[in-house]
Image (cartoon, rainbow, N blue to C red):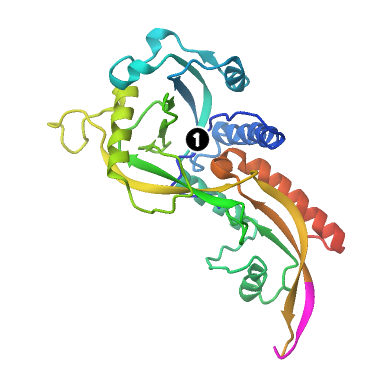
Amino acid sequence: MPSPRAGAHFRPVPVKTKQDAFENTMMLETYEELKRIADDPDIEDAGVTLITAVEYFDTTPTEDELDMFAVWPEYRLLEPDEMPTEGTAKSIKAGLTYSSWVIDTPTYLGWLQGQAESLGAIFVRSRLGAVQEAAFVAQEHRPDLAIPKIVVNASGTGFGDTRCFPTRSQYMLISNSYHSTVSHHSADGHTTVVIPRPFGGTVIGGTVEPHNWSPNNSRLAIEKILRRVAAVCPDLLQVPADDSSLPPAINVRQAYIGRIPMRKGGLRLEKEVITFNLPSEDSLDNELSSMSIVHCYGAGPNGFKIGWAIASRATSLVDQCCAASGNSI
Protein backbone atom coordinates (compact mmCIF):
# COMPACT_ATOMS: atom_id res chain seq x y z
CA MET A 1 0.00 0.00 0.00
CA PRO A 2 1.51 3.39 -0.96
CA SER A 3 2.47 5.66 1.90
CA PRO A 4 1.59 9.38 2.11
CA ARG A 5 4.86 9.87 4.01
CA ALA A 6 7.11 8.59 1.23
CA GLY A 7 9.49 10.96 -0.51
CA ALA A 8 8.39 9.46 -3.83
CA HIS A 9 10.90 10.34 -6.51
CA PHE A 10 12.34 8.50 -9.45
CA ARG A 11 15.86 7.16 -9.61
CA PRO A 12 17.06 4.11 -11.57
CA VAL A 13 18.11 0.88 -9.90
CA PRO A 14 20.69 -1.71 -10.99
CA VAL A 15 19.52 -4.52 -13.26
CA LYS A 16 21.22 -7.71 -12.10
CA THR A 17 18.48 -10.33 -12.27
CA LYS A 18 15.49 -11.29 -14.42
CA GLN A 19 13.22 -9.79 -11.75
CA ASP A 20 15.23 -6.53 -11.85
CA ALA A 21 14.81 -6.40 -15.63
CA PHE A 22 11.05 -6.95 -15.29
CA GLU A 23 10.71 -4.15 -12.75
CA ASN A 24 12.93 -1.87 -14.85
CA THR A 25 10.52 -2.33 -17.77
CA MET A 26 7.68 -1.31 -15.48
CA MET A 27 9.66 1.75 -14.37
CA LEU A 28 9.90 2.87 -17.98
CA GLU A 29 6.15 2.44 -18.46
CA THR A 30 5.28 4.24 -15.22
CA TYR A 31 7.73 7.05 -16.01
CA GLU A 32 5.88 7.71 -19.25
CA GLU A 33 2.49 7.78 -17.52
CA LEU A 34 3.68 10.12 -14.76
CA LYS A 35 5.28 12.36 -17.39
CA ARG A 36 1.95 12.45 -19.22
CA ILE A 37 0.18 13.48 -16.00
CA ALA A 38 2.80 16.14 -15.21
CA ASP A 39 2.62 17.57 -18.74
CA ASP A 40 -1.17 17.62 -18.97
CA PRO A 41 -2.38 21.25 -18.47
CA ASP A 42 -5.81 19.94 -17.45
CA ILE A 43 -4.37 17.99 -14.51
CA GLU A 44 -3.18 20.48 -11.92
CA ASP A 45 -4.10 18.67 -8.71
CA ALA A 46 -2.23 15.36 -9.05
CA GLY A 47 0.93 16.51 -7.27
CA VAL A 48 3.31 15.19 -9.96
CA THR A 49 6.15 17.35 -11.31
CA LEU A 50 9.12 16.71 -13.60
CA ILE A 51 12.42 17.81 -12.07
CA THR A 52 16.17 17.61 -12.51
CA ALA A 53 17.82 14.75 -10.63
CA VAL A 54 21.44 14.85 -9.45
CA GLU A 55 23.56 11.91 -8.25
CA TYR A 56 26.92 12.24 -6.47
CA PHE A 57 29.34 9.36 -5.93
CA ASP A 58 32.24 9.00 -3.51
CA THR A 59 33.44 6.05 -5.60
CA THR A 60 33.81 6.47 -9.36
CA PRO A 61 30.88 4.66 -11.05
CA THR A 62 31.62 1.71 -13.32
CA GLU A 63 30.52 1.69 -16.95
CA ASP A 64 27.66 -0.65 -16.05
CA GLU A 65 26.50 1.76 -13.36
CA LEU A 66 26.62 4.69 -15.77
CA ASP A 67 24.68 2.70 -18.37
CA MET A 68 21.89 2.33 -15.81
CA PHE A 69 21.40 6.11 -15.86
CA ALA A 70 22.21 6.77 -19.51
CA VAL A 71 18.90 5.42 -20.81
CA TRP A 72 16.90 8.12 -19.01
CA PRO A 73 16.06 11.54 -20.50
CA GLU A 74 18.55 14.42 -20.32
CA TYR A 75 21.34 12.26 -18.90
CA ARG A 76 24.85 13.70 -18.77
CA LEU A 77 27.93 13.62 -16.56
CA LEU A 78 28.59 16.63 -14.36
CA GLU A 79 31.66 18.81 -14.72
CA PRO A 80 33.91 19.21 -11.64
CA ASP A 81 32.78 22.80 -11.09
CA GLU A 82 29.15 21.63 -10.88
CA MET A 83 29.77 19.53 -7.78
CA PRO A 84 30.11 20.61 -4.12
CA THR A 85 33.61 20.55 -2.66
CA GLU A 86 33.34 21.66 0.97
CA GLY A 87 33.17 19.62 4.17
CA THR A 88 32.14 16.00 3.77
CA ALA A 89 31.36 16.73 0.09
CA LYS A 90 35.12 16.74 -0.59
CA SER A 91 34.84 12.97 -0.93
CA ILE A 92 32.69 13.24 -4.08
CA LYS A 93 34.51 11.89 -7.13
CA ALA A 94 31.80 11.94 -9.81
CA GLY A 95 28.32 13.22 -10.54
CA LEU A 96 25.61 12.96 -13.14
CA THR A 97 22.16 14.32 -13.87
CA TYR A 98 18.99 13.24 -15.69
CA SER A 99 15.29 14.12 -15.79
CA SER A 100 13.19 12.70 -12.97
CA TRP A 101 9.78 13.15 -11.37
CA VAL A 102 8.72 13.89 -7.83
CA ILE A 103 5.35 13.36 -6.19
CA ASP A 104 3.64 15.17 -3.36
CA THR A 105 2.36 11.91 -1.95
CA PRO A 106 -0.62 13.09 0.14
CA THR A 107 -1.88 15.11 -2.84
CA TYR A 108 -1.23 12.33 -5.35
CA LEU A 109 -2.93 9.62 -3.30
CA GLY A 110 -5.92 11.89 -2.78
CA TRP A 111 -6.08 12.52 -6.53
CA LEU A 112 -5.90 8.79 -7.28
CA GLN A 113 -8.69 8.16 -4.80
CA GLY A 114 -10.81 10.79 -6.50
CA GLN A 115 -10.18 9.21 -9.90
CA ALA A 116 -11.24 5.80 -8.58
CA GLU A 117 -14.34 7.19 -6.84
CA SER A 118 -15.42 8.88 -10.07
CA LEU A 119 -15.52 5.38 -11.58
CA GLY A 120 -17.66 4.01 -8.76
CA ALA A 121 -15.04 2.73 -6.29
CA ILE A 122 -15.81 2.78 -2.57
CA PHE A 123 -13.01 3.21 -0.03
CA VAL A 124 -13.31 1.48 3.36
CA ARG A 125 -10.74 1.36 6.16
CA SER A 126 -10.69 -2.03 7.88
CA ARG A 127 -8.17 -4.28 9.63
CA LEU A 128 -7.99 -7.71 7.98
CA GLY A 129 -6.62 -10.95 9.37
CA ALA A 130 -6.68 -12.84 6.08
CA VAL A 131 -6.99 -11.90 2.43
CA GLN A 132 -10.33 -13.66 1.97
CA GLU A 133 -11.82 -11.46 4.71
CA ALA A 134 -11.75 -8.59 2.20
CA ALA A 135 -14.63 -10.20 0.32
CA PHE A 136 -16.85 -10.15 3.43
CA VAL A 137 -15.93 -6.52 4.15
CA ALA A 138 -16.94 -5.65 0.59
CA GLN A 139 -20.24 -7.53 0.99
CA GLU A 140 -20.96 -5.62 4.20
CA HIS A 141 -20.67 -2.28 2.41
CA ARG A 142 -22.43 -3.40 -0.80
CA PRO A 143 -25.06 -5.90 0.38
CA ASP A 144 -26.91 -5.39 -2.91
CA LEU A 145 -24.13 -7.25 -4.72
CA ALA A 146 -23.03 -10.87 -4.55
CA ILE A 147 -19.96 -11.61 -2.47
CA PRO A 148 -16.85 -10.91 -4.60
CA LYS A 149 -15.08 -13.89 -6.11
CA ILE A 150 -11.91 -11.93 -6.95
CA VAL A 151 -9.72 -10.06 -4.46
CA VAL A 152 -6.61 -8.02 -5.30
CA ASN A 153 -4.05 -8.45 -2.53
CA ALA A 154 -2.18 -5.13 -2.59
CA SER A 155 -1.51 -5.27 1.14
CA GLY A 156 2.16 -4.29 1.00
CA THR A 157 3.47 -7.28 2.94
CA GLY A 158 0.99 -10.02 2.06
CA PHE A 159 -0.73 -12.07 4.73
CA GLY A 160 1.79 -14.25 6.51
CA ASP A 161 4.28 -14.20 3.61
CA THR A 162 7.53 -15.19 5.30
CA ARG A 163 9.53 -13.57 2.50
CA CYS A 164 8.32 -10.11 3.57
CA PHE A 165 10.15 -7.90 6.03
CA PRO A 166 10.39 -4.18 6.82
CA THR A 167 13.30 -1.87 6.12
CA ARG A 168 13.43 1.08 8.49
CA SER A 169 14.44 4.53 7.22
CA GLN A 170 14.96 7.81 9.04
CA TYR A 171 13.49 10.81 7.24
CA MET A 172 12.68 14.45 7.87
CA LEU A 173 10.20 16.82 6.28
CA ILE A 174 11.72 20.30 6.11
CA SER A 175 10.19 23.63 5.10
CA ASN A 176 13.11 24.49 2.78
CA SER A 177 12.42 24.26 -0.94
CA TYR A 178 14.94 22.98 -3.49
CA HIS A 179 15.38 22.88 -7.26
CA SER A 180 16.39 19.23 -7.81
CA THR A 181 16.44 15.81 -6.25
CA VAL A 182 19.85 14.81 -4.92
CA SER A 183 21.26 11.39 -4.05
CA HIS A 184 24.73 11.24 -2.50
CA HIS A 185 26.24 7.76 -2.45
CA SER A 186 28.87 7.72 0.28
CA ALA A 187 31.88 5.43 0.33
CA ASP A 188 30.58 3.95 3.61
CA GLY A 189 27.52 2.58 1.79
CA HIS A 190 25.00 5.16 2.98
CA THR A 191 22.89 7.24 0.62
CA THR A 192 21.69 10.73 1.54
CA VAL A 193 18.62 11.91 -0.36
CA VAL A 194 16.99 15.29 -0.95
CA ILE A 195 13.48 15.07 -2.44
CA PRO A 196 11.57 18.32 -3.07
CA ARG A 197 7.79 18.18 -2.88
CA PRO A 198 5.90 19.92 -5.71
CA PHE A 199 3.75 22.07 -3.42
CA GLY A 200 6.50 23.12 -1.02
CA GLY A 201 8.89 21.59 1.47
CA THR A 202 11.43 18.84 0.98
CA VAL A 203 11.93 15.31 2.31
CA ILE A 204 15.48 14.47 3.37
CA GLY A 205 16.99 11.20 4.58
CA GLY A 206 17.90 8.57 5.07
CA THR A 207 18.98 5.30 6.52
CA VAL A 208 18.47 1.74 5.27
CA GLU A 209 17.94 -0.71 8.14
CA PRO A 210 16.51 -4.12 7.11
CA HIS A 211 14.47 -6.05 9.71
CA ASN A 212 14.43 -3.09 12.13
CA TRP A 213 10.96 -2.66 13.65
CA SER A 214 11.78 0.36 15.82
CA PRO A 215 9.29 3.24 15.29
CA ASN A 216 11.47 5.70 17.21
CA ASN A 217 13.48 8.54 15.68
CA SER A 218 17.26 8.32 16.03
CA ARG A 219 18.84 11.56 17.25
CA LEU A 220 22.29 10.53 15.98
CA ALA A 221 20.92 9.59 12.53
CA ILE A 222 19.05 12.90 12.32
CA GLU A 223 22.18 14.89 13.16
CA LYS A 224 24.27 12.94 10.62
CA ILE A 225 21.66 13.41 7.87
CA LEU A 226 21.48 17.15 8.54
CA ARG A 227 25.28 17.48 8.33
CA ARG A 228 25.47 15.50 5.11
CA VAL A 229 22.62 17.37 3.45
CA ALA A 230 24.12 20.74 4.41
CA ALA A 231 27.47 19.73 2.90
CA VAL A 232 26.06 18.30 -0.34
CA CYS A 233 23.42 21.02 -0.85
CA PRO A 234 24.76 24.20 0.77
CA ASP A 235 22.23 26.33 -1.14
CA LEU A 236 19.41 24.39 0.52
CA LEU A 237 20.02 26.31 3.76
CA GLN A 238 17.51 29.16 3.95
CA VAL A 239 16.51 31.91 6.35
CA PRO A 240 13.31 30.89 8.21
CA ALA A 241 10.27 32.60 6.70
CA ASP A 242 8.93 33.51 10.15
CA ASP A 243 12.15 35.08 11.48
CA SER A 244 14.50 36.84 9.05
CA SER A 245 16.94 37.63 11.86
CA LEU A 246 18.06 34.00 12.02
CA PRO A 247 20.91 32.65 9.86
CA PRO A 248 20.25 30.29 6.93
CA ALA A 249 19.49 26.79 8.16
CA ILE A 250 17.61 23.59 7.47
CA ASN A 251 14.22 24.10 9.09
CA VAL A 252 12.86 20.75 10.22
CA ARG A 253 9.08 20.42 10.39
CA GLN A 254 8.98 16.78 11.38
CA ALA A 255 11.31 13.82 11.86
CA TYR A 256 9.75 10.42 11.25
CA ILE A 257 10.43 6.77 10.53
CA GLY A 258 9.39 5.19 7.26
CA ARG A 259 8.98 1.45 6.87
CA ILE A 260 9.53 0.06 3.39
CA PRO A 261 7.68 -3.24 2.76
CA MET A 262 10.45 -5.40 1.33
CA ARG A 263 10.12 -8.92 -0.05
CA LYS A 264 12.91 -11.39 -0.67
CA GLY A 265 12.77 -12.14 -4.38
CA GLY A 266 10.99 -8.88 -5.14
CA LEU A 267 7.46 -8.09 -6.26
CA ARG A 268 4.82 -10.80 -6.13
CA LEU A 269 2.50 -10.35 -9.10
CA GLU A 270 0.48 -13.47 -9.84
CA LYS A 271 -2.95 -15.05 -9.45
CA GLU A 272 -4.11 -18.09 -7.53
CA VAL A 273 -7.37 -19.76 -6.58
CA ILE A 274 -8.07 -20.53 -2.92
CA THR A 275 -10.95 -22.23 -1.14
CA PHE A 276 -12.76 -20.71 1.81
CA ASN A 277 -15.85 -21.32 3.92
CA LEU A 278 -18.92 -19.36 2.92
CA PRO A 279 -21.57 -19.18 5.68
CA SER A 280 -25.11 -20.20 4.82
CA GLU A 281 -28.01 -17.80 5.25
CA ASP A 282 -28.78 -19.13 8.74
CA SER A 283 -25.04 -19.23 9.58
CA LEU A 284 -25.48 -22.73 11.01
CA ASP A 285 -23.71 -24.46 8.16
CA ASN A 286 -20.81 -23.59 5.88
CA GLU A 287 -20.33 -24.37 2.25
CA LEU A 288 -16.98 -24.57 0.54
CA SER A 289 -16.43 -21.91 -2.10
CA SER A 290 -13.51 -20.67 -4.20
CA MET A 291 -11.99 -17.25 -4.69
CA SER A 292 -9.39 -15.88 -7.11
CA ILE A 293 -6.62 -13.84 -5.52
CA VAL A 294 -4.49 -11.47 -7.58
CA HIS A 295 -1.35 -10.90 -5.53
CA CYS A 296 0.27 -7.53 -6.07
CA TYR A 297 2.68 -6.60 -3.26
CA GLY A 298 6.32 -6.60 -2.20
CA ALA A 299 7.56 -3.80 -4.46
CA GLY A 300 9.87 -2.48 -1.73
CA PRO A 301 11.08 1.08 -2.45
CA ASN A 302 9.81 0.88 -6.04
CA GLY A 303 6.08 1.14 -5.36
CA PHE A 304 5.58 4.62 -6.80
CA LYS A 305 8.17 3.96 -9.53
CA ILE A 306 6.29 1.02 -11.02
CA GLY A 307 2.77 1.69 -9.76
CA TRP A 308 1.01 2.36 -13.07
CA ALA A 309 2.61 -0.64 -14.77
CA ILE A 310 1.72 -2.89 -11.82
CA ALA A 311 -1.88 -1.69 -11.98
CA SER A 312 -2.06 -2.48 -15.69
CA ARG A 313 -0.76 -6.02 -15.17
CA ALA A 314 -2.95 -6.62 -12.12
CA THR A 315 -5.95 -5.55 -14.21
CA SER A 316 -5.01 -8.11 -16.87
CA LEU A 317 -4.81 -10.82 -14.20
CA VAL A 318 -8.26 -9.82 -12.91
CA ASP A 319 -9.60 -10.07 -16.47
CA GLN A 320 -8.11 -13.56 -16.74
CA CYS A 321 -9.80 -14.56 -13.48
CA CYS A 322 -13.11 -13.23 -14.79
CA ALA A 323 -12.73 -15.12 -18.05
CA ALA A 324 -11.90 -18.33 -16.21
CA SER A 325 -15.04 -18.03 -14.07
CA GLY A 326 -17.26 -16.99 -16.98
CA ASN A 327 -17.95 -13.60 -15.43
CA SER A 328 -17.18 -10.05 -16.50
CA ILE A 329 -16.58 -6.82 -14.62
Along the line of sight, the residue nearer the viewer: 212 or 6: 212
**Horizontal arrangement in the rendering, residue 82 relative to residue 25 (left or right):** left
Magenta-drawn segment: 283-289
Which amino acid, mark 1?
Answer: His
For the point 65% across and 31% down, which residue is it?
A: 28
Q: Residue 233: in sight, yes or no?
A: no
Place of residue 65 in the rendered image (x, y in percent of width and height, measured from the top left): 58, 20
Q: What residue is pinned by disc 1?
A: 9
**Horizontal arrangement in the rendering, residue 288 relative to residue 168 (left or right):** right
Place of residue 322 in the rendered image (x, y in percent of width and height, measured from the top left): 81, 59
Q: Is residue 298 magenta?
A: no
Q: Quadrant of residue 293?
A: bottom right
**Horizontal arrangement in the rendering, residue 25 relative to residue 263 (left or right):** right
Q: Residue furthest left?
A: 245
**Circle 1 Cα neighbour tier, 10 Å, few/some/many (<14 / 14–19 / ≥20):** many
Place of residue 41 in the rendered image (x, y in percent of width and height, measured from the top left): 54, 34
Badge 1 element:
loop
Q: Is residue 284 magenta?
A: yes
